[in-house]
Amino acid sequence: MDKNSLKPEQIDILKEIGNIGMGNATTSLSKMLEEKIKMDVPEVSLISLSEVPELVGGPEKPVAVVFSKALGEVSFFIIFLMPEHSALNIIKALTDGETNEFCYMGRSVIREVGNIVGAAYLSALSFLTNYTFKQTPPILAIDMAGAILGTIFAEADLADDTLLLIKTILNTELTDFEGYLFIVPNWEKFKSIVEILGLELEE
Amino acid sequence: MITRVKIADIATQRGSGVLITVGLGSCIGTVFYDSKSITAGMAHVLLPDSTQFNSKKQNAMKFADTALPLMLDNMLKKGALKKNIVAKIAGGSKLFEFNTPDGKTEISVGEKNIQAVKKTLKHMGISLVAEDVGGTFGRTMKLFVDTGKVEISSLEGYKKLF
């Protein structure tokens, strides 16, 4: 896989999946938070795995990451990453100020937020492709961005040095929250999704 | 000079300066040091074994079995002698708990990496003089080239010097 293997129209399709999926996710989140959430247009890129930590503020940045695998005809990883202060802010907002730390309650709030975002994305993808996906229970880690992302890449057994990343940033004003959704598919298999959607667009 | 070693990356340096790799989770930071010629090397490997992958374009710096011989070569070119080189390692932690369908806990990638690095060192005939591996937290590894001392730190304020 090289950087030229994505055609502009394929990138558009991936962006559109990102848009719809994240649209679902932000609707759910803004209901929970009772405020509007701004979502950036998804960025789709092929990126060297050593560069990924730089995208979120460097490998040493403290972050909370909720991570699960989507299993099905096409399997991929769903990674929802929040800077530590964002994670603490959303815990505070969702527990009505009762807690703002990574205690049992706080961790479970964060896991749930990540779960909602991931599930919303998957249901959009499922709707668009007719594929069914089974999402593994979300796993949470709070540590340095580089340590967590490196571990996920290792778990993914990535044979390639380049990842296909669909990145979306969410932010809110009242809660001061920012989150990044990364979809890390096995590119070879993910092609079939792009093809399905491509064909549908041509009809 | 401070040299940053990224994921699946190797750096070698002689004389002075610092080699640093930030955010080792299940990955392993391996340091080679020759105190006679003051030559240092650092590798940040992601996976244990390159032979599991058949893809043609492999980054040798990503795997324990290929990165460490490559780092040794780079150091020999800089004037180090193999008989003087010792190794120190850090990382291989378990940030996530995965369960197999039958409920057993899988061997983590971190654990596999630790084993692979140790096996490779043994195979190469390089002695491992210090290690800080395992656990459930990420580490940053710093090597001071002039002394060969390694400093390990974590977000929670964990510190180790060896």
Image: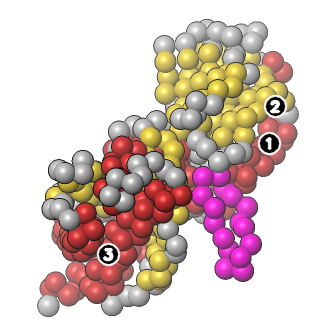
Circles 3 and 2: CB atoms closer than 8 Å: no
Residue position marked by numbered label 3 in the rendering: A120
Q: Chain of mark 1?
A: B
Amino acid under label 2? Answer: Leu
Q: Secondary structure at mark 1?
A: helix
Residue position marked by numbered label 2 in the rendering: B128
Residue A22 occupies quadrant: bottom left
- Vertical order, B86 against A63 (above or below): above
Q: Secondary structure at mark 2?
A: strand
Assign the N terminus of chain A to one quadrant of the image. bottom left
Spatial CA distance of label 1 from label 2 is 8 Å
The percent coordinates of residue B25 (x first, y second) are: 59, 45
Residue position marked by numbered label 1 in the rendering: B118
Residue at 35% over, 39% down? A57
Circles 1 and 2: CB atoms closer than 8 Å: yes
Label whose residue precedes the other's in the sequence (1 or 2): 1
Front disc: 3 or 2: 3
- In-front residue for pair B7/B37: B7
Q: Which residues are magenta?
A: B94-109
- Vertical order, A11 against A88 (above or below): below
Badge 3 and badge 2 both on one subunit: no
Amino acid under label 3? Answer: Ala
Assign the C terminus of chain A to one quadrant of the image. bottom left
Considering the whole magenta stretch, tell me its main secondary structure. loop
The percent coordinates of residue A180 (x first, y second) are: 32, 55
